[in-house]
Amino acid sequence: MKFIVGLGNPGREYENTKHNVGFLTVDILAEKLGIKVNKIKFKGLIGEGFIGGEKVILVKPQTYMNLSGNCVREVLAFYKAEPSDMIVIYDDIDIPLGTLRIRKKGSAGTHNGMRSVIYDIQSDNFPRIRIGIGSEHKGDLVNYVISGFSGEAKDEIEKTILRAADAAICMVENGIDKAMGEYNTKKKKNTEADSEE
């Protein structure tokens, strides 16, 4: 059994913000897999289904970002699952907009939701998919992450979310090494100027 957790904030006002790309990816996965993520359990929204022959549980914590670990801890405890059975999908301010980075484990970096998850389950030994929301940003971080996307950035992030959903499916079906090889964004040569918002 695998658990795919998308991090985000509940509520309509946060729906399409940068901080909610984890939620948005789980929504795309649910659509692709025909899973309804609508059961309220473990302080989150849960949906069950299959990828290939593997049972998967999609999770959207409803505790607000900074307490995401509360939900994750309860899910893993209930199913007696290991952290390594889980994939966490979240936004990352530290990598360029539209970049996808898959890692087997690691620290939370600057992400408060991930800090909460690692603190609550006392482990960083789980795969994650990081969706870049723009490392070039300077200024008020909170306002930036809870704002939406516009113009080219919106098109870029929509494509990246679709790739992130496909990467999660690949991780379950074929393993993380295969997914890293196929979906990690390759470093681009500086042939194109970074688009400014």
Image (cartoon, rainbow, N blue to C red):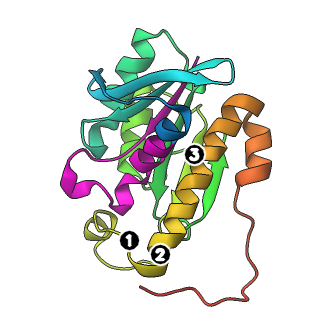
Q: Earlier in the sequence, mark 1 or mark 3?
A: 1
Task: Name the amino acid, label 3.
Answer: Ala
Q: Which residue lies at the image location 60% right of the left edge and 25% below the top edge?
A: 84
Q: At 77% from the left edge and 51% from the top edge, which residue is drawn?
A: 182
3D distance between C-alphas at marks 2 and 1:
6 Å
Residue 25 located left or right of residue 193:
left
Task: Quadrant for the C terminus, please.
Answer: bottom left
Residue with the mark numbered 2: 153
Q: Residue at x 61, y 37 (%)?
A: 127
- At label 2, the amino acid type is Ala
Which quarter of the figure has residue 54?
top right
Counting labels gives 3
Q: Which residues are magenta?
A: 1-28
Instruction: Identify the residue position indicated by label 1 in the image.
Output: 149
Q: Is residue 159 left or right of residue 154?
A: right
Please report contact status of discs 2 and 1: CB closer than 8 Å, yes or no. yes
